[in-house]
Amino acid sequence: MDEIKWLLAFRYADMRRAGDAYRVCRDLVFDLDIDASAYRIQLNTVPHVVVIGDGELLPSLRQMVERACVYGVEAELPEDIVSALFERRTVGKIPGAFWERRSQ
């Protein structure tokens, strides 16, 4: 049986706006204690914010992420990037591995 996974990606004109959106998305993941991860990446020098998770993507969470990413444009990511992000997320969930939240 395949696991349900979801991904929301947004591209930005600059790193500042991408960084602002990333911080809000990262805080959503931690504050809501959801099974998801937030990333800020660059593809061909274009900043992106990506939020990925396991299980059903609830409409309320989608709306919160979309609000956080309001200055971005929804984007499609190449399949190899999607695979790499989900692989990184899987490694981070291995018992004994710990990814710390960066706080300000």
Image (cartoon, helix red, strand yellow):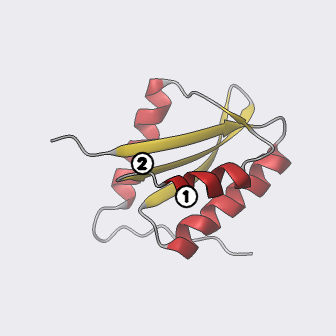
Give the vertical position of 64 relative to 85 (above or below): below
Residue 5 numbered tag: none
Looking at the rendered structure, the kind of residue marked 2 is Arg
Q: Is residue 67 left or right of residue 62?
A: right
Q: Where residue 53 appears, x then y in whole percent?
A: 43, 52
The residue depicted at 57 percent of the width and 75 percent of the height is 31
Q: Is residue 4 left or right of residue 51?
A: left
The residue depicted at 46 percent of the width and 34 percent of the height is 82
> Disc 1 or 2, which lies upstream in sequence?
1
The residue depicted at 63 percent of the width and 30 percent of the height is 75
Looking at the rendered structure, the kind of residue marked 1 is Leu
Along the line of sight, the residue nearer the viewer: 54 or 57: 57
- Mark 1 element type: helix
Q: Where residue 65 appears, x then y in whole percent?
A: 63, 53
Q: Quadrant of the N terminus?
A: top left
- How far apart are the alpha carbons under marks 1 and 2? 22 Å
The residue depicted at 49 percent of the width and 32 percent of the height is 81
> Residue 98, located in which quarter of the rendered image?
bottom left
Within 10 Å of disc 1 (Cα), the crowding (few <14, some 14-19, many 20+) is: some
User: Disc 1 marks which residue?
Assistant: 61
Q: Nearer the viewer, mark 1 or mark 2?
A: 1
Q: Where residue 72 appears, x then y in whole percent?
A: 76, 40
Along the line of sight, the residue nearer the viewer: 30 or 42: 30
Within 10 Å of disc 2 (Cα), the crowding (few <14, some 14-19, many 20+) is: few
> Residue 44, located in which quarter of the rendered image?
top right
Residue 88 numbered tag: 2
Q: Where residue 80 appears, x then y in whole percent?
A: 44, 27
